[in-house]
Image: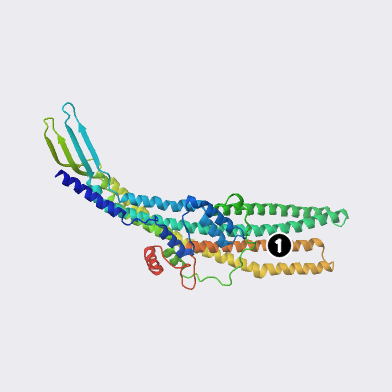
Amino acid sequence: MRRGLVHGLYAIALLGLLAGCATLPKDAGLAEVQDHVRQRSGLTIDRQTPDAEERVADGIRSLLVEQLSESTAVEIALLGNRRLQATLEGLGIARAELWQSGLPRNPILGGEIRFPGRPFEISLIQEVLDLVWLPKRRRLAAASFEQVKLSAASEVLDLVAEVRKAYYSAQAAAQASEMRRAVADAARAAAELAIRQHEAGNISDLQLENEQALFGQAKLDLARSEEDEHLTRERLNVLLGLWGDMTEWSIAPRLPELPPEELDLAGLESFAAAQRLDLAAARREVEVAARALPLSRSSAFEVEGGVHHEKEPEGTTSTGPAVEVSVPVFDRGGAGRSRARAVLAQAEERYAALAVEIRSEVRSARHRMLSARSRAAYYRDVVLPRRSRIVGFSQQEYNFMLIGAFQLLAARREEIAARGEYIEALRDYWIARSDLEHAAGGRWSASDKSPASGGSASGASAGEDHDRGEEELR
């Protein structure tokens, strides 16, 4: 009987162990994260190993040889950002927790020896309910693992959006500094001319001080612009994981112009509800909380079974089954179940709140993008041509001695300043466009209402996720 009981206990434990290990992904779910990212952005990510660090650094240096473009910046960030690598390592932690969830508790071997006569007792005890709850714990851990994978993929897309925004900011800052230098040069020329004319008695003290003040303000504006250029470069360095000589990169000198046509933005909110990975992760959080509910009272009840073998002082021995059952006098599991219900309700509220926030995020980003596009187009089509005509007319009147050099230089300063404002509007457009793509959960395609390569948060079709997301958001 003793041997049969022992074998029976270990047979149950072995079955639980096999069930726990049968479906563990060897890559810790990295392939699924890669699929989610590729479907929404067309980009490829990978987990870096310590022995590949030098090879990755060489690859980054080769990408930095040419002027930094937006796509190259994203590629470098996916290679060199160490926080991204830390996020991907979190998949290994989640895999280990999933593995642990499929393992039953170790049996407990107990023994006593008493003197004189040396009688003894030996017992082998296994937590029985632990084996009963093993499949539920396994399913709970599997749902948590799915949530971790979705969250990891969402963090990758967050990084991509941040890199694009930082890139456009750095590009605009460099272009603005160039404009400010031109303004400062024009102000310097005017200030030097004012000094010469004042010495000749052609202008008053007031005119001299005005030109000197304009030059001083131009120098301050240039200093602020150069500081902004430095800070935006450093922000991009952090996101790209660059340090040392790798920070001496050059950037494409001009922001992209406005695209000729804007994307069709109809249905973008519903699209975002189906595509956003953080919303899919929040949906998984609700599932995890729901699966944890049946397990919430398990800690209050313990049933241990096993084998007990005893040798009496007279030399007789006895062997038989052993059972220990906790008596739920104080803790009946009510507190645990109450907490689990509150966690489930909290997860449901968070999911609903995130769905509302995503829709608002899409609307806000869409409004900012269209507003920035309108401003940039107005500068391009109205303000800049008018400023250019003013400079042309001023040059003609200066040639005919109808105006002085100061008026001509002022017209040129105003034209350059208007170009700086156009750069800011163009920067705001591209940042808002990047925000909108991120808010939508993928690069928006007007032709098929899908991201760059299609796909959905759970591996189903985009249409299925769209319908499910719409139903859950109502």
Amino acid type, callout 1: Ile
Judging depth in this view, the residue of 162 and 309 nearest the camera is 309
Judging depth in this view, the residue of 279 and 19 nearest the camera is 19
Horizontal relation, residue 250 to residue 183: left or right: left
Above or below 249: residue 386: below
The part of the image, by quadrant, that contains residue 122 is: top left
Quadrant where the image shows the C terminus: bottom left
Quadrant where the image shows the N terminus: top left
Horizontal relation, residue 334 to residue 64: left or right: left
The part of the image, by quadrant, that contains residue 19 is: bottom left
Let me know if residue 252 appears in the view: yes
Q: Under tag 1, what secondary structure? A: helix
Let me know if residue 302 appears in the view: no
Horizontal relation, residue 294 to residue 423: left or right: left
Q: Which residue is drawn at 58% across and 70% down?
A: 259
Q: Which residue is drawn at 19% across and 29% down?
A: 114
> What residue did someone put label 1 on?
416
Report how many numbered discs are placed on residues in the image.
1
Judging depth in this view, the residue of 347 and 233 nearest the camera is 233
Q: Mark 1: few, some, or many residues within 10 Å (few <14, many ≥20)?
A: many
Horizontal relation, residue 376 to residue 6: left or right: right
Where residue 25 sits in the image (x, y, percent)?
Answer: 36, 56
Where residue 293 sits in the image (x, y, percent)?
Answer: 29, 52
Coloring scheme used = rainbow
Where residue 215 sits in the image (x, y, percent)?
Answer: 75, 54
Where residue 121 sits in the image (x, y, percent)?
Answer: 18, 35
